[in-house]
Image (tube, rainbow, N blue to C red):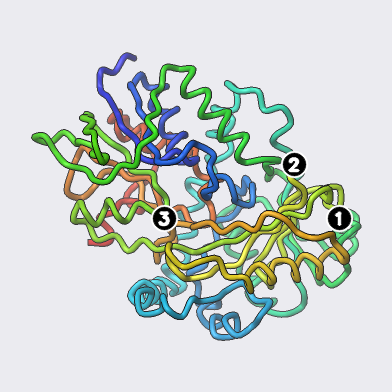
Amino acid sequence: MKQSLEIGIIGTGIQGVSNALFLQKKGFKVTLFDKDEPGSSAASYGNAGHFSPYASVPLNRPDVILDVPAMLLSSTGPLSLKWNYVPKMLPWFFKFIKNSTKKKMMYTAKNMHQILDLALPAYDELFEEINLDGLVENKGILYIWNEKDLKSRELEIQIRKELGVKQQIVNQKEIHDLEPNIKRFYHGGVYYSYARHARNPKKILLKLFELFLKKGGNFIKQKIKNVEFDDEKPILKSDNESFLFDKIVITCGAFSKRFTDNLNEKIPLDTERGYHVHFKNCDHLLNRPVIFSNRGFGITPMEQGLRVVGTVEFGGLNNPLTKSRIKNLIDNAKYMLGDLPEHEDEWLGFRPTLPDFLPVMGPSKNHKNIFYCFGHHHLGWTLGPISGKIVSGMIAKENTNLNLEPYSSIRFS
């Protein structure tokens, strides 16, 4: 079906490119904007590379709240704070606590499961049109843990069981058979055999971006400063140019708040800062991604070597990289695998996170021609295509049997 509408999208991460491709499938003319080249060092480049359709259990849970003080005090723990950011973070954190009841946790888990269940088929729709060249491996993803905090692990297993998520509980021998190079500190784990991982997320993103251009898409490398309106049509303003569209989609991840604030919509978006390092030529040590739940970090075998990712640091967008967080990743990797060579590529990225751990997808509260697609926290990479498919369907005014209300920005007003 041929659509005459022109759509502008701000942001060329996995959300922006996925929205663009699914809008093209529906016949829309699409222009992508970004201040950087696609695949630059933002979240879609530096993530863990997991396609994790099982990951419906959110961080906003009663057991996590109780563990926060201990996590903050532990040098090997998954959580840290930039103290200069605490005053700014407090309103977000109070909302996070309010969303951490058992009832809210189940509400989030159910509504994450609804979209995660469709995540891999949405990727496959896009992957049919590109040559992946071995960039995706279907070897599953393994979670392991020690004998501490077993109640939290049981809770996660129970929630996923209630939601109908496929999971295989594995014992010490089965973990060793799957990953013989891991030191035997573990007590048990869960294996998701149908999960996948990217050998190089940046290359996959660039292949999808090239597909967008091949299908007649337009890319303008400019920093969009503001959104204004001509009647109800949005105008994207850069320093020296204006671009008029029928509708726009804001897919700037953690940087989306600048736009929503200017559009007079108070969305409590903040950032969880995540880190990675690489150990070059070590990817043969693991067959698949392995996550050590107790310490909140994971290791993925990639083209660049072993990518060690993880930790959550609350510190906003402007604080510099924290060296102790890098050291934390290195120490944890050596704890898991023993001796490793000198690390490379210290990277810091920003996960866009809302206090209820659900993304925002859909029209702006105040402007019917502006759509949002951001706030996917740890699951931005997994949820790119399904989010693009959902938002493109909204723009095309298609009917859906999904309940999309939980993702509306109106929930914050």
In this view, 338 is above or below 287: below
Q: Residues within 10 Å of mark 3 (few under 14, many from 20)?
A: many
Q: Quadrant of residue 86?
A: bottom left
The image's mark for residue 303 is: 2
Alpha-carbon distance for marks 1 and 2? 19 Å
Task: From the image, tell me which residue sits under label 1.
Answer: 179
Question: Do the CB atoms of the residues marked 1 and 2 lie less than 8 Å apart?
Answer: no
The image's mark for residue 254 is: 3
For the point 21% across and 50% down, which residue is it?
365
Name the element at disc 2: loop
Question: Do the CB atoms of the residues marked 3 and 1 lie less than 8 Å apart?
Answer: no
For the point 48% across and 45% down, which residue is it?
115
Is residue 350 visible in the rendered image? The answer is: yes
Name the element at disc 1: loop
Name the element at disc 3: helix
- Residue type indicated by callout 1: Glu
- Residue type indicated by callout 2: Glu
For the point 42% across and 38% down, which residue is it?
16
Q: Disc 3 or disc 1, which is closer to the eye?
A: 3
352 sits left or right of 404 in the view: right
48 sits left or right of 138 in the view: left
**Quadrant that contains the C terminus:** bottom left
